[in-house]
Amino acid sequence: MCGTVGLFMGCSAVSLCPKQALFARRDDETGTAPEGAGRDAAGRDGQEPDRTAEDAYVSPFRNWYERSTVRSAERRTLGPLTAGQGFFAPELVPLASHPLIAGLRDERPEIYRDVLVRHLYRYLDFTAKLEHLVVNRTVLGIAHGTIGVRLPEAMRLDAFKIYCDEAYHALFSADLAAQVRAATDVRAELPEVPYFITRLERYLEETPDDLTALTEILFVIVSETLITAQLSDMWNDRSVAPAVREAVRDHALDEGRHHAYFAVFLRHLWGQLTPDTRRRAALRVPRLIRIFTDPDIPSVESEVVGYGLSRDEARQIVSELFPAAAVTAYAKSVAQQTVRHFASVGALDDEQVRAEFAAHGLL
Ligand SMILES: [Fe+2]
Ligand SMILES: [Fe+2]
Protein backbone atom coordinates (compact mmCIF):
# COMPACT_ATOMS: atom_id res chain seq x y z
CA MET A 1 0.00 0.00 0.00
CA CYS A 2 2.16 2.85 1.22
CA GLY A 3 5.14 1.38 -0.68
CA THR A 4 3.31 2.06 -3.96
CA VAL A 5 2.88 5.75 -3.44
CA GLY A 6 5.08 6.69 -6.40
CA LEU A 7 3.10 4.57 -8.80
CA PHE A 8 -0.41 5.29 -7.71
CA MET A 9 -2.02 8.33 -6.18
CA GLY A 10 0.01 9.08 -3.12
CA CYS A 11 -1.62 8.61 0.23
CA SER A 12 -4.64 10.72 -0.67
CA ALA A 13 -6.78 8.01 0.90
CA VAL A 14 -4.91 7.95 4.19
CA SER A 15 -8.09 7.12 6.01
CA LEU A 16 -7.84 3.67 4.40
CA CYS A 17 -4.38 3.04 5.72
CA PRO A 18 -4.20 1.03 8.94
CA LYS A 19 -0.75 2.41 9.60
CA GLN A 20 -2.14 5.92 9.42
CA ALA A 21 -4.94 4.96 11.80
CA LEU A 22 -2.41 3.64 14.27
CA PHE A 23 -0.48 6.89 14.07
CA ALA A 24 -3.72 8.82 14.56
CA ARG A 25 -4.53 6.75 17.63
CA ARG A 26 -1.08 7.33 19.06
CA ASP A 27 -1.43 11.06 18.40
CA ASP A 28 -4.77 10.89 20.15
CA GLU A 29 -3.16 9.38 23.22
CA THR A 30 -0.58 12.13 23.30
CA GLY A 31 -3.25 14.76 22.75
CA THR A 32 -2.01 15.71 19.27
CA ALA A 33 -4.73 14.14 17.14
CA PRO A 34 -5.16 15.95 13.80
CA GLU A 35 -8.45 17.69 13.16
CA GLY A 36 -10.98 15.20 11.81
CA ALA A 37 -9.36 12.16 13.45
CA GLY A 38 -12.03 9.83 14.82
CA ARG A 39 -14.26 10.49 11.83
CA ASP A 40 -14.37 7.87 9.13
CA ALA A 41 -14.03 7.75 5.35
CA ALA A 42 -17.69 8.58 4.94
CA GLY A 43 -17.32 11.56 7.27
CA ARG A 44 -19.40 10.04 10.06
CA ASP A 45 -18.63 9.90 13.75
CA GLY A 46 -17.98 6.43 15.18
CA GLN A 47 -21.11 4.46 16.10
CA GLU A 48 -21.96 1.02 17.40
CA PRO A 49 -21.97 -1.97 14.99
CA ASP A 50 -25.26 -2.93 13.38
CA ARG A 51 -26.18 -6.17 15.18
CA THR A 52 -29.09 -7.00 12.87
CA ALA A 53 -26.78 -7.03 9.85
CA GLU A 54 -24.24 -9.10 11.77
CA ASP A 55 -26.80 -11.81 12.43
CA ALA A 56 -27.83 -11.88 8.78
CA TYR A 57 -24.41 -12.29 7.15
CA VAL A 58 -23.86 -15.64 5.44
CA SER A 59 -20.24 -15.81 4.39
CA PRO A 60 -19.47 -16.71 0.75
CA PHE A 61 -16.07 -17.84 2.09
CA ARG A 62 -17.29 -20.79 4.18
CA ASN A 63 -15.21 -23.21 2.06
CA TRP A 64 -12.37 -20.79 1.37
CA TYR A 65 -9.66 -22.94 2.95
CA GLU A 66 -10.61 -25.85 0.68
CA ARG A 67 -11.71 -23.98 -2.46
CA SER A 68 -9.72 -20.79 -2.97
CA THR A 69 -7.05 -20.83 -5.66
CA VAL A 70 -4.30 -19.73 -3.30
CA ARG A 71 -5.11 -22.60 -0.93
CA SER A 72 -6.01 -25.39 -3.32
CA ALA A 73 -4.78 -24.91 -6.90
CA GLU A 74 -1.41 -25.84 -8.23
CA ARG A 75 0.84 -23.36 -9.95
CA ARG A 76 -0.16 -22.98 -13.60
CA THR A 77 2.88 -23.74 -15.70
CA LEU A 78 3.18 -23.12 -19.39
CA GLY A 79 3.84 -26.26 -21.40
CA PRO A 80 4.62 -26.47 -25.12
CA LEU A 81 1.64 -25.40 -27.25
CA THR A 82 0.01 -27.93 -29.54
CA ALA A 83 -0.72 -27.09 -33.20
CA GLY A 84 -3.30 -24.34 -33.54
CA GLN A 85 -3.03 -23.24 -29.89
CA GLY A 86 -2.47 -19.57 -29.06
CA PHE A 87 -1.92 -17.43 -25.98
CA PHE A 88 -5.41 -15.88 -25.97
CA ALA A 89 -8.76 -16.47 -27.69
CA PRO A 90 -8.56 -14.28 -30.85
CA GLU A 91 -12.27 -13.42 -30.69
CA LEU A 92 -11.62 -11.72 -27.33
CA VAL A 93 -8.76 -9.61 -28.70
CA PRO A 94 -10.26 -6.59 -30.48
CA LEU A 95 -7.10 -5.91 -32.46
CA ALA A 96 -6.98 -9.47 -33.82
CA SER A 97 -10.42 -9.01 -35.34
CA HIS A 98 -9.50 -5.99 -37.46
CA PRO A 99 -9.13 -7.01 -41.15
CA LEU A 100 -5.64 -5.45 -41.40
CA ILE A 101 -4.43 -7.59 -38.48
CA ALA A 102 -6.59 -10.70 -39.06
CA GLY A 103 -5.09 -10.80 -42.57
CA LEU A 104 -1.68 -11.40 -41.00
CA ARG A 105 -2.76 -14.74 -39.54
CA ASP A 106 -1.52 -16.61 -42.63
CA GLU A 107 0.81 -13.99 -44.16
CA ARG A 108 2.80 -13.10 -41.02
CA PRO A 109 1.87 -15.65 -38.32
CA GLU A 110 4.64 -14.43 -36.00
CA ILE A 111 3.08 -10.95 -35.85
CA TYR A 112 -0.39 -12.40 -35.35
CA ARG A 113 0.95 -14.48 -32.44
CA ASP A 114 2.52 -11.33 -30.95
CA VAL A 115 -0.86 -9.56 -31.07
CA LEU A 116 -2.38 -12.31 -28.89
CA VAL A 117 0.64 -12.41 -26.57
CA ARG A 118 0.59 -8.64 -26.09
CA HIS A 119 -3.12 -8.76 -25.30
CA LEU A 120 -2.40 -11.42 -22.68
CA TYR A 121 0.33 -9.20 -21.20
CA ARG A 122 -2.07 -6.27 -21.05
CA TYR A 123 -4.71 -8.39 -19.34
CA LEU A 124 -2.23 -9.83 -16.81
CA ASP A 125 -0.66 -6.46 -16.07
CA PHE A 126 -4.10 -4.91 -15.63
CA THR A 127 -4.99 -7.68 -13.18
CA ALA A 128 -1.78 -7.52 -11.15
CA LYS A 129 -1.92 -3.73 -10.78
CA LEU A 130 -5.65 -3.60 -10.09
CA GLU A 131 -5.32 -6.17 -7.29
CA HIS A 132 -2.22 -4.74 -5.66
CA LEU A 133 -2.65 -1.03 -6.14
CA VAL A 134 -6.40 -0.56 -5.96
CA VAL A 135 -8.45 -3.46 -4.59
CA ASN A 136 -6.14 -4.53 -1.80
CA ARG A 137 -5.70 -0.96 -0.56
CA THR A 138 -9.39 -0.89 0.27
CA VAL A 139 -9.58 -4.54 1.39
CA LEU A 140 -6.78 -3.90 3.87
CA GLY A 141 -8.80 -1.03 5.29
CA ILE A 142 -11.89 -3.26 5.56
CA ALA A 143 -9.92 -6.02 7.30
CA HIS A 144 -8.54 -3.62 9.87
CA GLY A 145 -11.70 -1.62 10.30
CA THR A 146 -10.08 1.66 9.28
CA ILE A 147 -12.37 2.71 6.44
CA GLY A 148 -15.20 3.69 8.71
CA VAL A 149 -17.82 1.20 7.55
CA ARG A 150 -19.29 -0.79 10.43
CA LEU A 151 -19.30 -4.46 9.50
CA PRO A 152 -20.00 -7.79 11.16
CA GLU A 153 -16.84 -9.35 12.54
CA ALA A 154 -17.19 -12.21 10.04
CA MET A 155 -17.05 -9.74 7.14
CA ARG A 156 -13.86 -8.23 8.44
CA LEU A 157 -12.32 -11.67 8.72
CA ASP A 158 -13.44 -12.47 5.17
CA ALA A 159 -11.61 -9.34 3.99
CA PHE A 160 -8.37 -11.00 5.14
CA LYS A 161 -9.23 -13.88 2.79
CA ILE A 162 -9.97 -11.54 -0.11
CA TYR A 163 -6.64 -9.84 0.55
CA CYS A 164 -4.86 -13.20 0.17
CA ASP A 165 -6.86 -14.04 -2.97
CA GLU A 166 -6.06 -10.73 -4.66
CA ALA A 167 -2.39 -10.90 -3.73
CA TYR A 168 -2.24 -14.37 -5.26
CA HIS A 169 -4.08 -13.20 -8.39
CA ALA A 170 -1.41 -10.54 -8.79
CA LEU A 171 1.33 -13.13 -8.27
CA PHE A 172 0.01 -15.71 -10.70
CA SER A 173 -0.59 -13.01 -13.30
CA ALA A 174 2.99 -11.77 -13.03
CA ASP A 175 4.25 -15.35 -12.95
CA LEU A 176 2.34 -16.31 -16.09
CA ALA A 177 3.52 -13.18 -17.93
CA ALA A 178 7.12 -14.06 -17.01
CA GLN A 179 6.63 -17.63 -18.27
CA VAL A 180 5.17 -16.42 -21.57
CA ARG A 181 8.00 -13.91 -21.96
CA ALA A 182 10.56 -16.66 -21.44
CA ALA A 183 8.80 -18.93 -23.95
CA THR A 184 8.16 -16.35 -26.69
CA ASP A 185 10.73 -13.58 -26.24
CA VAL A 186 7.89 -11.09 -26.87
CA ARG A 187 8.42 -7.94 -24.83
CA ALA A 188 5.43 -6.44 -23.06
CA GLU A 189 6.06 -2.71 -23.73
CA LEU A 190 3.15 -1.60 -21.57
CA PRO A 191 2.80 1.79 -19.94
CA GLU A 192 4.28 1.79 -16.45
CA VAL A 193 1.03 3.12 -15.04
CA PRO A 194 -2.03 1.42 -16.58
CA TYR A 195 -4.62 3.69 -18.17
CA PHE A 196 -7.37 2.92 -15.67
CA ILE A 197 -5.14 4.01 -12.79
CA THR A 198 -4.22 7.24 -14.57
CA ARG A 199 -7.91 7.92 -15.19
CA LEU A 200 -8.88 7.07 -11.65
CA GLU A 201 -6.10 9.25 -10.31
CA ARG A 202 -7.32 12.20 -12.40
CA TYR A 203 -10.88 11.64 -11.29
CA LEU A 204 -9.85 11.52 -7.65
CA GLU A 205 -7.94 14.77 -8.08
CA GLU A 206 -11.13 16.50 -9.20
CA THR A 207 -13.19 14.82 -6.45
CA PRO A 208 -14.17 16.94 -3.43
CA ASP A 209 -11.90 16.07 -0.49
CA ASP A 210 -14.73 14.73 1.65
CA LEU A 211 -15.62 12.17 -1.06
CA THR A 212 -12.13 11.00 -2.09
CA ALA A 213 -11.89 7.94 0.17
CA LEU A 214 -15.51 7.01 -0.50
CA THR A 215 -14.94 7.28 -4.27
CA GLU A 216 -12.00 4.88 -3.99
CA ILE A 217 -14.20 2.41 -2.09
CA LEU A 218 -16.92 2.75 -4.75
CA PHE A 219 -14.38 2.02 -7.47
CA VAL A 220 -13.48 -1.21 -5.72
CA ILE A 221 -17.17 -2.19 -5.39
CA VAL A 222 -17.59 -1.47 -9.11
CA SER A 223 -14.50 -3.43 -10.13
CA GLU A 224 -15.48 -6.39 -7.93
CA THR A 225 -19.02 -6.62 -9.27
CA LEU A 226 -18.53 -6.13 -13.03
CA ILE A 227 -18.92 -9.38 -14.91
CA THR A 228 -17.01 -10.20 -18.06
CA ALA A 229 -18.97 -13.21 -19.20
CA GLN A 230 -16.82 -13.56 -22.31
CA LEU A 231 -13.79 -14.65 -20.33
CA SER A 232 -15.59 -17.70 -18.99
CA ASP A 233 -15.97 -18.89 -22.59
CA MET A 234 -12.20 -19.22 -22.65
CA TRP A 235 -12.16 -21.85 -19.87
CA ASN A 236 -13.01 -24.65 -22.28
CA ASP A 237 -11.41 -23.23 -25.39
CA ARG A 238 -8.90 -25.88 -26.46
CA SER A 239 -7.26 -23.41 -28.85
CA VAL A 240 -5.91 -21.44 -25.87
CA ALA A 241 -2.77 -22.43 -23.94
CA PRO A 242 -3.94 -24.54 -20.95
CA ALA A 243 -2.01 -22.46 -18.38
CA VAL A 244 -3.79 -19.30 -19.59
CA ARG A 245 -7.30 -20.72 -19.50
CA GLU A 246 -6.68 -22.40 -16.14
CA ALA A 247 -5.45 -19.11 -14.67
CA VAL A 248 -8.52 -17.30 -16.02
CA ARG A 249 -10.74 -19.99 -14.53
CA ASP A 250 -8.97 -19.91 -11.14
CA HIS A 251 -9.43 -16.17 -11.01
CA ALA A 252 -13.08 -16.21 -12.02
CA LEU A 253 -13.99 -18.81 -9.38
CA ASP A 254 -12.43 -16.69 -6.62
CA GLU A 255 -14.10 -13.57 -7.97
CA GLY A 256 -17.52 -15.20 -7.73
CA ARG A 257 -17.10 -15.15 -3.93
CA HIS A 258 -15.79 -11.58 -4.00
CA HIS A 259 -18.78 -10.44 -6.03
CA ALA A 260 -21.19 -11.87 -3.46
CA TYR A 261 -19.21 -10.22 -0.65
CA PHE A 262 -19.13 -6.76 -2.21
CA ALA A 263 -22.85 -6.84 -2.95
CA VAL A 264 -23.38 -7.26 0.82
CA PHE A 265 -20.65 -4.74 1.60
CA LEU A 266 -22.45 -2.15 -0.56
CA ARG A 267 -25.61 -2.61 1.49
CA HIS A 268 -23.71 -1.97 4.73
CA LEU A 269 -21.91 1.05 3.30
CA TRP A 270 -25.06 2.58 1.83
CA GLY A 271 -27.06 2.16 4.99
CA GLN A 272 -24.47 4.16 6.89
CA LEU A 273 -24.28 7.19 4.59
CA THR A 274 -26.40 10.29 4.99
CA PRO A 275 -29.02 10.83 2.23
CA ASP A 276 -26.99 13.72 0.83
CA THR A 277 -23.74 11.69 0.70
CA ARG A 278 -25.59 8.76 -0.90
CA ARG A 279 -26.79 10.99 -3.69
CA ARG A 280 -23.39 12.58 -4.26
CA ALA A 281 -21.75 9.14 -4.17
CA ALA A 282 -24.27 7.61 -6.59
CA LEU A 283 -23.61 10.40 -9.07
CA ARG A 284 -19.97 9.29 -9.23
CA VAL A 285 -20.62 5.63 -9.95
CA PRO A 286 -21.29 5.80 -13.73
CA ARG A 287 -17.99 7.54 -14.35
CA LEU A 288 -16.17 4.93 -12.23
CA ILE A 289 -17.72 2.16 -14.31
CA ARG A 290 -16.52 3.80 -17.51
CA ILE A 291 -13.04 4.39 -16.08
CA PHE A 292 -12.85 0.64 -15.64
CA THR A 293 -14.42 -0.49 -18.91
CA ASP A 294 -13.24 2.02 -21.53
CA PRO A 295 -10.40 0.69 -23.71
CA ASP A 296 -6.81 1.80 -23.53
CA ILE A 297 -6.75 3.39 -26.97
CA PRO A 298 -3.27 5.04 -26.85
CA SER A 299 -1.64 1.75 -25.83
CA VAL A 300 -3.34 -0.22 -28.65
CA GLU A 301 -2.44 2.54 -31.10
CA SER A 302 1.26 2.44 -30.25
CA GLU A 303 1.20 -1.35 -30.36
CA VAL A 304 -0.08 -1.17 -33.96
CA VAL A 305 2.68 1.30 -34.88
CA GLY A 306 5.14 -1.23 -33.39
CA TYR A 307 4.02 -3.74 -36.04
CA GLY A 308 5.27 -1.37 -38.77
CA LEU A 309 1.99 0.39 -39.64
CA SER A 310 1.87 4.18 -39.91
CA ARG A 311 0.44 6.40 -37.19
CA ASP A 312 -2.50 7.26 -39.49
CA GLU A 313 -3.25 3.59 -40.12
CA ALA A 314 -3.04 2.93 -36.38
CA ARG A 315 -5.50 5.76 -35.71
CA GLN A 316 -7.85 4.39 -38.33
CA ILE A 317 -7.68 0.90 -36.85
CA VAL A 318 -8.50 2.01 -33.30
CA SER A 319 -11.32 4.27 -34.47
CA GLU A 320 -12.83 1.32 -36.33
CA LEU A 321 -12.25 -1.07 -33.44
CA PHE A 322 -13.63 1.15 -30.71
CA PRO A 323 -16.56 3.22 -32.02
CA ALA A 324 -18.31 5.04 -29.17
CA ALA A 325 -21.47 2.93 -29.54
CA ALA A 326 -19.54 -0.35 -29.17
CA VAL A 327 -17.59 0.91 -26.16
CA THR A 328 -20.83 2.02 -24.49
CA ALA A 329 -22.57 -1.27 -25.30
CA TYR A 330 -19.68 -3.18 -23.72
CA ALA A 331 -19.83 -1.03 -20.57
CA LYS A 332 -23.58 -1.57 -20.30
CA SER A 333 -23.32 -5.33 -20.70
CA VAL A 334 -20.55 -5.91 -18.15
CA ALA A 335 -22.08 -3.45 -15.65
CA GLN A 336 -25.61 -4.89 -15.62
CA GLN A 337 -25.20 -6.59 -12.28
CA THR A 338 -23.33 -3.65 -10.76
CA VAL A 339 -26.13 -1.29 -11.77
CA ARG A 340 -28.64 -3.74 -10.28
CA HIS A 341 -26.79 -3.72 -6.95
CA PHE A 342 -26.83 0.08 -6.81
CA ALA A 343 -30.50 0.10 -7.82
CA SER A 344 -31.29 -2.42 -5.07
CA VAL A 345 -30.01 -0.04 -2.38
CA GLY A 346 -32.15 2.75 -3.85
CA ALA A 347 -29.28 4.67 -5.43
CA LEU A 348 -31.14 5.07 -8.72
CA ASP A 349 -34.36 6.33 -7.19
CA ASP A 350 -33.05 9.87 -7.57
CA GLU A 351 -33.89 11.34 -10.98
CA GLN A 352 -30.55 13.07 -11.43
CA VAL A 353 -28.66 9.87 -10.59
CA ARG A 354 -30.70 7.92 -13.15
CA ALA A 355 -29.95 10.61 -15.72
CA GLU A 356 -26.23 10.29 -14.98
CA PHE A 357 -26.32 6.49 -15.42
CA ALA A 358 -28.26 6.96 -18.67
CA ALA A 359 -25.82 9.60 -19.92
CA HIS A 360 -23.03 7.05 -19.54
CA GLY A 361 -25.05 4.50 -21.51
CA LEU A 362 -25.62 2.24 -18.51
CA LEU A 363 -29.43 2.04 -18.46
FE1 LIG B 1 -8.88 -10.81 -8.27
FE1 LIG C 1 -11.66 -9.67 -6.33
Image (spheres, helix red, strand yellow):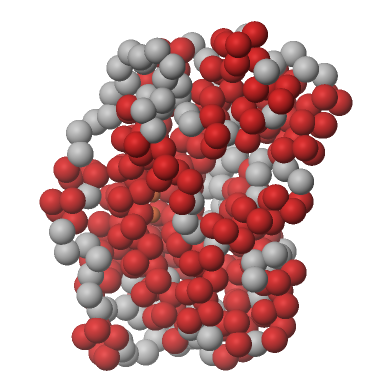
Dividing the picture into quadrants, the one containing residue 255 is: bottom left
Is 52 placed above or below 80 here?
Answer: below
Which residue: 25% across, 90% down?
Answer: 51
Residue 31 is at least partly visible in this image: no
Which residue: 82% across, 19% down?
Answer: 310
Dividing the picture into quadrants, the one containing residue 148 is: bottom left
Of residue 285 and residue 19, the one placed in the foreground of this image is 285
Please give left or right for residue 1 compared with residue 236 in the image. right
Please give left or right for residue 270 compared with residue 268 in the image. right
Of residue 35 and residue 17, the one placed in the foreground of this image is 17
Is 5 placed above or below 151 here?
Answer: above
Across and down, in percent, residue 97 comes to 64, 30
Dividing the picture into quadrants, the one containing residue 80 is: top left
Which residue: 32% across, 21% down?
Answer: 78
Quadrant in which the C terminus appears: bottom right
Across and down, in percent, residue 173 comes to 39, 35
Across and down, in percent, residue 184 comes to 46, 12
Please give left or right for residue 73 compared with residue 203 in the image. left
Could you tell me how many numbered marks the image carries? 0
Across and down, in percent, residue 286 comes to 64, 67
Which residue: 28% across, 24% down?
Answer: 77
Is 129 placed above or below 134 here?
Answer: above
